């Protein structure tokens, strides 16, 4: 089955654009290439989302060689930072106020509770 | 150098330099246009005129400072056509940042999270600054 357009494009962006960024970044203002661990775990998360889930509202290379993923539903925001070592920092915010923060060593089934929170 | 990055001020030597970085100065953080996927193409909820965590969350955040350069120079010469996040030193300190002059670049002020200056800035501190920053 074909991937949804947003998901296919986001995956291509990581493969074609993010992985081609300079390494190291040329200055403190530029972003550099995310680490292979960050790319791999960000791709795993994007691929693992159920069909029909919200499209990403933000996908960005972080200034410390990770990848940030963000989804929105009304005033709720779910942000997952995949750090340079591949570990995850998860943030739930409502109306721009942080309501929950946690970390995971890598993507696993416990991420599901965050995706359920956003959709509820 | 740590984790492949080189820092202007080594870990362990960072502090809030209130004597040399006044609260009333304006700081500009130029935002690399290569940083983001175009989410708005696929999601109408994607905010396009907002400063995000990923824009500013860093262990050592370089910013251009208003007593050494101008916004016009920054946007026309140093970072042509880049978007810029603007905030004052007082706003950054209110969020929990420490400010120091960059010893390697006289036009820059460096920001560190005062709750952990030798680590990547915490999300609550960086998030607070995203709410105060103006996108130019």
Image (tube, coloured by chain):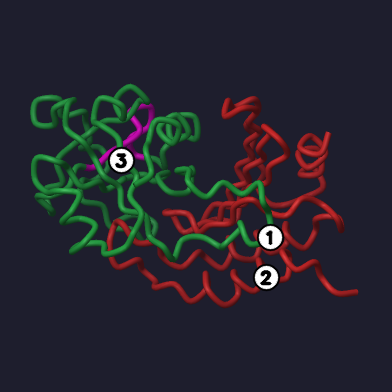
Chain colours: A red, B green
In the picture, measured across the screen, residue A23 lies left or right of residue A48, that is: left
- Of residues B69 and B21, the one nearer the viewer is B69
Residues at discs 1 and 3 in contact (Cβ within 8 Å): no
Q: Is residue B112 magenta?
A: yes
Residue, far right: A1
Q: Which residue is mark 2?
A: A9
At horizontal 9% and vertical 25% (from top left) the residue drawn is B19
At horizontal 51% and vertical 65% (from top left) the residue drawn is A35
Disc 1 is attached to a residue of which chain?
B
Residues at discs 2 and 1 in contact (Cβ within 8 Å): yes
Residue A36 picture quarter = bottom right
At horizontal 64% and vertical 40% (from top left) the residue drawn is A90
Q: Which residue is mark 3?
A: B86
In the picture, measured across the screen, residue B55 lies left or right of residue A106, that is: left
Disc 2 is attached to a residue of which chain?
A
- Residue span colored magenta: B110-118
Label 2 CA crowd tier, 10 Å (few <14, some 14–19, many 20+): some
Q: Position of residue A112 (x, y in %)?
A: 81, 44
Q: Which residue is mark 1?
A: B42
- Of residues B118 and B114, the one nearer the viewer is B114
Q: Quadrant of the N terminus of chain B?
A: bottom left
């Amino acid at each position: 089955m074909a991937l949804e357009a947003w998901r296919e494009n986001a995956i291509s962006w990581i493969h074609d654009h993010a992985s081609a960024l300079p390494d190291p970044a040329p200055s403190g203002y530029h972003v550099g290439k995310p680490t292979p661990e960050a790319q791999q775990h960000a791709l795993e998360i994007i691929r693992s989302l159920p069909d029909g889930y919200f499209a990403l509202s933000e996908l960005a290379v972080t200034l410390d060689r990770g990848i940030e993923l963000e989804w929105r539903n009304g005033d709720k925001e779910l942000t997952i930072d995949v750090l340079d070592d591949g570990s995850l920092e998860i943030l739930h915010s409502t109306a721009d106020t942080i309501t929950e923060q946690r970390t995971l060593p890598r993507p696993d089934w416990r991420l599901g509770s965050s995706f359920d929170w956003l959709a509820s | 150098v740590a984790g492949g990055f080189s820092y202007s001020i080594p870990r362990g030597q960072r502090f809030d330099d209130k004597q040399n970085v006044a609260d009333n100065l304006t700081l500009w953080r130029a935002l690399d246009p290569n940083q983001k996927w175009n989410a708005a193409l696929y999601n109408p909820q994607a905010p396009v005129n907002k400063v995000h965590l990923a824009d500013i969350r860093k262990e050592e955040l370089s910013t251009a400072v208003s007593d050494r350069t101008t916004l016009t120079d920054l946007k026309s010469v140093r970072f042509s056509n880049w978007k810029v996040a603007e905030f004052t030193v007082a706003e950054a300190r209110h969020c929990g940042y420490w400010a120091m002059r960059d010893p390697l670049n006289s036009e820059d002020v460096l920001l560190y999270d005062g709750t952990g200056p030798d680590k990547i800035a915490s999300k609550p501190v960086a998030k607070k600054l995203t709410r105060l920053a103006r996108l130019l």
